[in-house]
Amino acid sequence: MNNSATTRAITKIALQYNGNDKGTAEMVASNYLLRDTAEGQFNEMKTVAERNTKVKKWALTGYISQPDEISRKLKDEEFKQIAIEALAKVGLTNKNQYRLDIHNSTKHKHIHFVVNRIDISGKCTVKAHDIGRRFGEAVREVCKEKGLLTDIEIGIQKKAEMLKSLTEAIRSENNFDDLILAMKRKGFEVQLSSNVKDGISGMRIVMEKDKNLQTERVYKAGYKLSEISNHLKISEIKSLFEVKKVVREAQKNADKLKEFRENLQQRGFSVKIQYNGEFKAGQKNEIQDLWINKVDSNGQEKNGFFFRKNVGFSLSAIDSDLGDLGKLLNKNNEINNQNTHSDSETNESLIEIADGLLGDFLKPTYVSQDEDELWKKKRKLRR
């Protein structure tokens, strides 16, 4: 449950707001308040608060908001009990004045409270120190005691759902505009932030069903990308889209592996081949994956969600549609292997590429740029 609590010196307006809510508010609990009007109740609270002149911010105000995951099964009486028990954990006693009102005018039902921190004997029972955090913990404790999901547990579930949908959208789309539309179809709003230096520099994802314009000033819905995943960075997504773009451009002008690789190299990208099984010269060798990386990767040094240091991006991992490219290259690779005698020059070129990438052991793995350069030098010496 979303919640908030703060100490302050209030006026009668706070009680008027609690008891109104566009005419839909329902008072569900009160203690040591005799008057019916907001002004009368405020005067009663103020009189008690003046019994302790050391405390200036004598009121505790806040709310608890039900998420959809809970509100469908929680009755008003149960909701009220959660609020009272949570307040008791931060110092509320049966000698404190308070008023609790359930508000129904917004998308999510929520309960507001106004509590006099000074009890009728003049003692301050609700300490101000770190009250927001302590009240949040109190709400979670009560929820656990009642077998309800806490805001943290609900948040974990939502973040996992967001990350799953985001990675699916990243793999299926080629730019941020299409990514935003794809996420919208999945029920999420993607909010991008930018600056002059980096361009797009941040992302926030909000579940459409969680958007609540009435309470936006109280708490901001959704999560930043860094809160959803500590591995997936906005810079990585930008690089990934760049790789997709150059791959598609290179694919337009190449139907053979050698041509495709050369096209990417001209654009400043390296290609490393992963075969399905051990590479064997003169035989059918199925390409399992291609790894694409910037030759000058100074700006992308760390491992990420999709990116692997010194290797780059796996084509099969970053694009759900690029499997067709793998099939095309495998088909041409198979044709070239079958026509060894009639097209030996092309076949030899493919073997040399694989040889240079996979090294002495000819394993279906990835090799460093240095090793690639070494094999190029060896081939030159043979000539």
Image: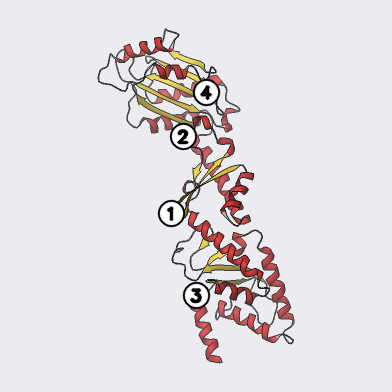
Q: Residue at x 61, y 44 (%)?
A: 184
Q: Secondary structure at mark 1?
A: loop
Nearer-N-terminus badge (4/1):
4
Identify the disc placed on residue 196: 1
Where is mark 2, residue-wise?
219
Where is mark 3, residue-wise?
369
In the visual, does 46 lie left or right of 326? left
Nearer the camera: disc 4 or disc 2: 2
> At which x and y percent is residue 159?
53, 44
Q: Secondary structure at mark 4?
A: helix
Tag count = 4
Q: Which residue type carries mark 4?
A: Phe
Q: Which residue type carries mark 2?
A: Tyr
Give 56 or 286, whichever is nearer the viewer: 56
Residue 233 appears in the figure? no
Nearer-N-terminus badge (2/1):
1
Q: Residue at x 67, y 83 (%)?
A: 346
Residue 283 appears in the figure? yes
Location of residue 339 by image quarter: bottom right
Where is mark 4, residue-wise?
79
Location of residue 41 by image quarter: top left
Q: Secondary structure at mark 3?
A: helix
Nearer-N-terminus badge (4/3):
4
Q: Secondary structure at mark 2?
A: loop
> At which x and y percent is residue 360?
55, 81
Identify the disc placed on residue 41: none
